[in-house]
């Protein structure tokens, strides 16, 4: 299974993931450690497996010593969540007294349900491709496989930014807002130096994208494919860049 340095080669990307979102992958590594340590595990051993800092992963990429310290602090927050939510418990007898843990039934279920391949695919998606206004939140939401929330948040941000850039009212919403902001004959975000056909096409692009990808997910067409969700938030990012370019100084 991919270690954190392989999943997040940039330490900043790992640190941007909320600790509770790291719970499933840590539990998966805990299940691996539990098998290696005779039916119990030590949290430090799990962290070594997860970061590639153990003899079981000799060729794995690793973070620098300074980044390792940041990772340990970040994972400690995730472990506090894991313990508080009852995913692990102390082992019985002397082993428990010496710091060994075991997965509870809830923790085992979470570890078994963790899809390492899908997680790797989500983590490989480059956050830098997303507009800075949505990058952190949407990227993290995609990584935990909350696809509908990611798309919804991306297009909701687009709606907010179009309304603000066009100086329109709170009553202007949805695809109607887009058509008004990019109206062919003098919308506040319309570039009147563009040909008529391009102005109309851009209006249709904004209204159509919002109508299809923002509204349908909220009502009747939940997105279930990770790649589809990634492409859709990329579209929202591109539209946000257009809004930036049209925003009045």
Image (spheres, helix red, strand yellow):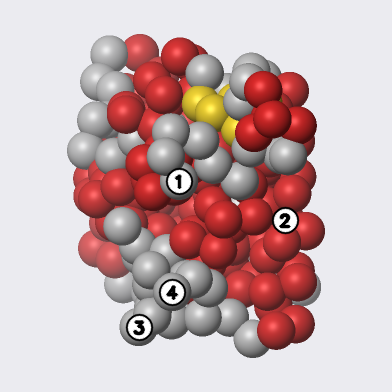
Give residue 102's position: percent from left, percent from top.
Answer: 54, 28
Give residue 202's position: percent from left, percent from top.
Answer: 34, 57
Element under label 2?
A: helix
Badge 3: residue crowd in 10 Å (few <14, some 14–19, many ≥20): few
Q: Is residue 17 visible?
A: yes
Determine the residue positioned at 75% across, 45% down: 77
Residue beneath disc 3: 59
Earlier residue among tags 1 and 4: 1
- Dots 2 and 4: beta carbons under 8 Å? no
Question: Residue 185, located in which quarter of the rendered image?
Answer: bottom left
Q: Tell whether 131 sits left or right of 145.
A: right
Give the Cα distance between marks 1 and 4: 14 Å
Q: Give the label on residue 54, or none.
A: none
Badge 1: residue crowd in 10 Å (few <14, some 14–19, many ≥20): few
Give the Cα distance between marks 2 and 4: 22 Å
Badge 4: residue crowd in 10 Å (few <14, some 14–19, many ≥20): few
Quarter placement of the N terminus: bottom left
Q: Is residue 179 visible?
A: no
Which numbered mark, 2 or 4, is in the foreground of this view? 4
Earlier residue among tags 2 and 3: 3
Which numbered mark, 2 or 3, is in the foreground of this view? 3
Residue beneath disc 1: 37
Which numbered mark, 2 or 1, is in the foreground of this view? 1
Q: Give the label on residue 55, or none.
A: 4
Element under label 3?
A: loop
Give residue 59's position: percent from left, percent from top.
Answer: 35, 83
Give the Cα distance between marks 2 and 3: 23 Å
Give 34 or 186, whichever is nearer the viewer: 34
């Amino acid at each position: 299974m991919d270690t954190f340095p392989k999943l997040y080669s940039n330490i900043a990307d790992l640190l941007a993931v909320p600790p509770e979102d790291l719970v499933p992958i840590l539990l998966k590594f805990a299940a691996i450690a539990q098998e290696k340590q005779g039916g119990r595990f030590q949290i430090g051993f799990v962290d070594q497996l997860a970061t590639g800092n153990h003899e079981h992963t000799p060729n794995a990429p690793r973070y620098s010593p300074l980044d390792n310290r940041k990772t340990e602090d970040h994972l400690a927050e995730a472990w506090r969540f894991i313990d508080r939510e009852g995913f692990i418990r102390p082992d019985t007898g002397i082993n428990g007294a010496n710091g060994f843990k075991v997965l509870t039934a809830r923790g085992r279920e979470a570890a078994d349900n963790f899809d390492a391949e899908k997680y790797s695919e989500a983590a490989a998606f480059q956050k830098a491709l997303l507009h800075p206004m949505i990058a952190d939140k949407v990227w993290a939401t995609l990584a935990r496989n909350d696809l509908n929330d990611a798309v919804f948040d991306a297009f909701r941000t687009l709606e907010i930014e179009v309304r603000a850039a066009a100086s329109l009212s709170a009553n202007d919403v949805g695809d109607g807002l887009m058509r008004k902001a990019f109206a062919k004959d003098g919308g506040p975000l319309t570039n009147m130096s563009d040909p008529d056909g391009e102005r109309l096409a851009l209006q249709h692009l904004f209204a159509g994208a919002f109508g299809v990808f923002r509204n349908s997910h909220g009502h009747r067409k939940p997105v279930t494919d990770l790649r589809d969700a990634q492409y859709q938030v990329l579209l929202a990012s591109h539209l946000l860049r257009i809004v930036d370019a049209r925003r009045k100084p």
